[in-house]
Amino acid sequence: MTGRLTRSRINILILLLTGLMVLGCSSGFSANKYKEMTEKGDEAFASSEYQTALGYYQQALTLAVESENQENKATALYNIGHVYLEQGLAELALENLEKALNIRIELGDTEEKSKDELISLAEEWMNVAILQQLINDNPAALHSYQEALSIYETVGDVESIRIVEAQIDTLPEFEFNVNLVQNPGNEEPLVNGEIPYWEEVSGINWGRNAEVPVYEGNAYFDAGEAGEYAELRQIIDVSGYTMSIDDGQQKFVIEVHMRSYPLQLFVPVDGAQLSIGFYDADNEPLDYVISEQYFVTDRWAEYINTLLAPRGTRKISIHLVSYKYGGYDSDGYFDGLSLVALPPE
């Protein structure tokens, strides 16, 4: 099903593209039929008769294809894309604008283009980027913004550079193959007695410890004095990966190292357990993965799992759970956490 833009989102897009639309640009060919269809399409478009305009632009596209005129083909596709934009059909608009852009790129080396031609090319990259962002294909949008930015830097268009940089700043954060967990090894100093970026769900004495050898760095996560169950949580925004998540292609790799206090005579070993939750934009749970309990006392046990995010996922929660089976403290320990988004295959 083709995505549909709301009227408010269309207005935002048109505002951002003010001065970027160039309709009816053609070189013409025999009988001026292409020029005639384009001009009629422009007139219908200006009168908000979008379906009529679409018909004329599609005729112009057919003529351009038949004549093997790539420049006219690109212009027709560009015009068709803007009709779909006005009709709120985001994916169809993007499809045609991307085709037009690809033809423009193929028509000549960037180094051979005039300043006006380069600016026009940058504007087309911006058109595509904004639409990609609106349908939440954020990695593609970032690439397109960066292409536009590079061209504006080449021609020294300071104001356009500012606009592109501002648009990039509106993208949700996302990166592939980097750790999305903040303070993953509990290395940051406590703030008012609390572990930065983590929330105590159960137990009020979670802190930093290094009583047993750490897995890495200078500390690990320790629940301290607690009841039978202690839980620490971090919620991670993954909305930047919306497109690949909703296409059913986004995988995440979770890794954590767990252990317990060294074995003591007549004292039961406490357990350490990891759980991962997937939630939609309304915080409704979509899926949950729970590791086994670890009772390792002489080393750090590694847990690694590759998980396919359910469609609709916008947040991932990581839960560190320590189970106390004896003694005063809850001695399930955690260190060296990571959550990494893999590039879609």
Image (cartoon, rainbow, N blue to C red):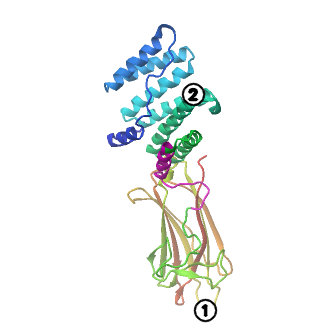
Q: Is residue 5 visible?
A: no
Q: Which residues are magenta?
A: 159-179
Q: Residues within 10 Å of mark 1 (few under 14, many from 20)?
A: few
- Figure quadrant of the N terminus: top left
Residue placed at 51% from the left, 75% from the top? 321
Query: Where is residue 132 drawn, in percent x and y?
Result: 48, 42
Query: Where is residue 304 drawn, in percent x and y?
Result: 62, 64
Q: Is residue 229 left or right of residue 344?
A: left
Residue placed at 39% from the left, 29% from the top? 83
Q: Secondary structure at mark 1?
A: loop
Q: Is residue 17 visible?
A: yes
Answer with the quarter of the image where residue 340 lies.
bottom right
Q: Is residue 167 above or below residue 74?
A: below
Q: Is residue 121 left or right of residue 283?
A: right
Residues 345 and 151: in front is: 151
Answer with the quarter of the image where residue 204 lies.
bottom left
Residues 130 and 152: in front is: 152
Residues 96 and 238: in front is: 96
Q: Which amino acid type is marked by label 2?
A: Ile
Tell me, for residue 103, which label it has, or none.
Answer: 2
Answer with the quarter of the image where residue 216 lies.
bottom right
Residue lying farthest to the bottom in this orientation: 266
Query: Where is residue 63 drawn, in percent x and y?
Result: 50, 15
Whether residue 162 appears in magenta in the rendering, the answer is: yes
Q: Which amino acid type is marked by label 1?
A: Phe
Q: Is residue 54 above or below residue 146?
A: above
Q: Residues within 10 Å of mark 2 (few under 14, many from 20)?
A: some
Q: Secondary structure at mark 2?
A: helix
Q: Is residue 24 above or below residue 184?
A: above
Residue occupied by mark 1 = 266
Spatial CA span between label 2 and label 1: 76 Å
